[in-house]
Image (spheres, rainbow, N blue to C red):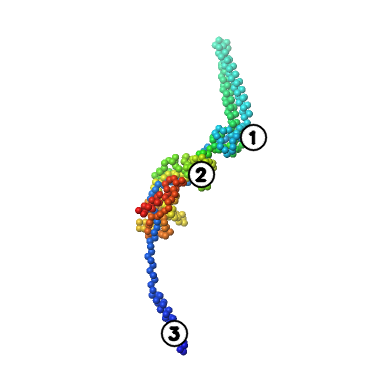
C-alpha cells in the first residue's frame, strides 16, 4: 500500500511542473519588430531635348547607270573583246560584227554618188545651153523648162546618194559594238558565231556604273503624310531634303561606312502597295554595294526640338504591350503612368504622351516599389550611353538623362 503512494507522487509533480512552465511561457511578451524603412530609388528628372527623327525603310540597290548594249545591225558576231565582269571604258569596243556586207553597201553608195554627180554635171551644162537657145528662140520654152527640171532632179539625186553614203558609213560603224558608259560588264548574252538582228534588238551585254550607287526605298504614304503634318505644325524642324542624312545597313547587319544623300521622293503613290519610292545615293568606291542587294536605310527626316526621352531602365511593358513608367510625385509617392512612345533614341525611349518635363521617373529600384508607396528619391547614376547615330554622329542619347539626373540632385 505504501509502495503505490510513492509511485503516484512523481506523476503529480511532473504535471505541476509542466503547468508552471507553460504559464511562464504564456506570460512572456513577443519581441518588438523594427520600424519599416522608406525604400530608396534612383530617379531622373525629365527635360526636353532636341532629338533627330529617323525612319527606317527597306529597299534595294540599283546601278547609277545601267546601259543595255544591243545589236543595231544584223550580222554574225566575229569576236568578243572584253572580260566578263571586268571594267570597260566608254567607247571601248565590246564585239565585232562581220562588216563585209556593210563595206559592200558603202562602196555601192559611193558609186551611186559618183554617178549622180556625173548626171548633175551633164544636166547643168544642158540647162545652160538651153538658156542661150531659148533667148534666141532656137528651142521652145518647154524644152528649156525640161532641161532645168532635169538639172534639179540630178541635184536631188546627188543629195540622196550622199545620204546613202552616210547611212552606209553609220551601219558599218555599228559593226563595232562599243560601250556607251564606263562601268562593269555583265555576263555576255551572245557568243562568237551567233547571229544578231537589229529588228529584234538583241541584248548582247549590260554595262553598269557602280560608283556612285542608287538605293531605292519604299515608304508608306501614311508615314509621309504624318511627317509633313508634324513639320507644318512646327513639331519637327528640317533643313530640306538635301540635308537629310541616310545611313545604310547591309544584309549582314553591318553599317555601311559611307553616309548617303537623299535624292528625291516619288510624286506618285503605288496604288497596289500604298507606298512611294524614296531614292538615296551613296559613294561606292570599294564596290561593296552591288545592284539588287536588299538593304535597310535610316533617314534623318527632321529634328524634334522639344522631345522627352526616358532611359530604357525606366520603361516597362505590361502583357498588352502598353509602355509604363513609375513616377515619384511631389508627395514622394509612386504613381504608374501609361505612355505613348514614338520609338527609341540610343538607349532611351522617346515619349509622345504620358509624361511631362520635370517628372521624376524611377530608373533604379523599380522592382522594390509599387503604386501608392512612399519612397526616398535620389539622383540615379546611369552609365554613359553611346550616341544614337552610327559613328558617333548626332546628339548623344545620354545627354538628356544625364542632365536630368544631376538636375534632380541639385
Q: Which residue is mark 3?
A: 9
Q: x, y percentage for residue 383?
A: 43, 53
Q: CA distance from mark 3 to mark 2?
A: 102 Å
Q: CA distance from mark 1 to mark 3?
A: 132 Å
Q: x, y percentage for residue 334?
A: 39, 58
Please, which residue is most extreme toward the bottom here? 1
Q: Which of pointers 1 and 2 lies earlier in the amino acid sequence?
A: 2
Closer to us: 14 or 368: 14
Q: Is residue 185 left or right of residue 343?
A: right
Residue at coordinates 61% horizontally, 37% vertically from top-left?
Answer: 190
Q: Is residue 333 left or right of residue 223?
A: left
Disc 1 crowd, CA 10 A, few/some/many (<14, 14-19, 20+):
few
Q: Which residue is mark 1?
A: 193
Give above or below for 233 relative to 336. above
Closer to us: 273 or 115: 115
Please tell me whether mark 2 sits on a helix, a strand or a loop. Answer: strand
Q: Is any atom of residue 350 visible in this view?
A: no
Please tell me whether mark 3 sits on a helix, a strand or a loop. Answer: helix
Give above or below for 16 relative to 286. below
Q: Which residue is mark 2?
A: 59
Q: Is any atom of residue 263 visible in this view?
A: yes
Residue at coordinates 35% horizontally, 58% vertically from top-left?
Answer: 331
Q: x, y percentage for residue 151?
A: 57, 18
Give above or below for 85 relative to 353. above
Amino acid at each position: 500500500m505504501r509502495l503505490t503512494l510513492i509511485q503516484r507522487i512523481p506523476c503529480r509533480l511532473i504535471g505541476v511542473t509542466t503547468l508552471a512552465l507553460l504559464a511562464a511561457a504564456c506570460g512572456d511578451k513577443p519581441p518588438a519588430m523594427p520600424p519599416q524603412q522608406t525604400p530608396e530609388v534612383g530617379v531622373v528628372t525629365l527635360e526636353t531635348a532636341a532629338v533627330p527623327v529617323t525612319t527606317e525603310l527597306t529597299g534595294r540597290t540599283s546601278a547609277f547607270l545601267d546601259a543595255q548594249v544591243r545589236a543595231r545591225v544584223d550580222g554574225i558576231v566575229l569576236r568578243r573583246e572584253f572580260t566578263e565582269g571586268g571594267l570597260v571604258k566608254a567607247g571601248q569596243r565590246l564585239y565585232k560584227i562581220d562588216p563585209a556586207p556593210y563595206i559592200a553597201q558603202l562602196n555601192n553608195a559611193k558609186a551611186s554618188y559618183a554617178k549622180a554627180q556625173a548626171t548633175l554635171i551633164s544636166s547643168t551644162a544642158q540647162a545652160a545651153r538651153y538658156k542661150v537657145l531659148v533667148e534666141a528662140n532656137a528651142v521652145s520654152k518647154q524644152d528649156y523648162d525640161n532641161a532645168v527640171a532635169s538639172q534639179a532632179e540630178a541635184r536631188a539625186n546627188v543629195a540622196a546618194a550622199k545620204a546613202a553614203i552616210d547611212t552606209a558609213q553609220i551601219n558599218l560603224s555599228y559593226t563595232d559594238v562599243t560601250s556607251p558608259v564606263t562601268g562593269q560588264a555583265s555576263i555576255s548574252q551572245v557568243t562568237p558565231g551567233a547571229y544578231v538582228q537589229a529588228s529584234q534588238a538583241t541584248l548582247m551585254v549590260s554595262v553598269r556604273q557602280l560608283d556612285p550607287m542608287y538605293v531605292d526605298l519604299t515608304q508608306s504614304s501614311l508615314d509621309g503624310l504624318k511627317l509633313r503634318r508634324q513639320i507644318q505644325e512646327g513639331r519637327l524642324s528640317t533643313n530640306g531634303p538635301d540635308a537629310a542624312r541616310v545611313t545604310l545597313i547591309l544584309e549582314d547587319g553591318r553599317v555601311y561606312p559611307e553616309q548617303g544623300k537623299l535624292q528625291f521622293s516619288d510624286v506618285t503613290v503605288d496604288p497596289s502597295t500604298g507606298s512611294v519610292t524614296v531614292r538615296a545615293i551613296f559613294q561606292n568606291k570599294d564596290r561593296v554595294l552591288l545592284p539588287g542587294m536588299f538593304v535597310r536605310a535610316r533617314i534623318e527626316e527632321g529634328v524634334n526640338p522639344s522631345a522627352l526621352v526616358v532611359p530604357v531602365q525606366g520603361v516597362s511593358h505590361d502583357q498588352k504591350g502598353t509602355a509604363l513608367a513609375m513616377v515619384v510625385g511631389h508627395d514622394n509617392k509612386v504613381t504608374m503612368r501609361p505612355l505613348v512612345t514614338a520609338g527609341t533614341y540610343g538607349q532611351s525611349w522617346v515619349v509622345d504622351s504620358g509624361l511631362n518635363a520635370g517628372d521624376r521617373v524611377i530608373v533604379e529600384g523599380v522592382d522594390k516599389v509599387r503604386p501608392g508607396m512612399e519612397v526616398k528619391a535620389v539622383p540615379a547614376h546611369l552609365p554613359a550611353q553611346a550616341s544614337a547615330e552610327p559613328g558617333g554622329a548626332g546628339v548623344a542619347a545620354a545627354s538628356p538623362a544625364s542632365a536630368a539626373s544631376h538636375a534632380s540632385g541639385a
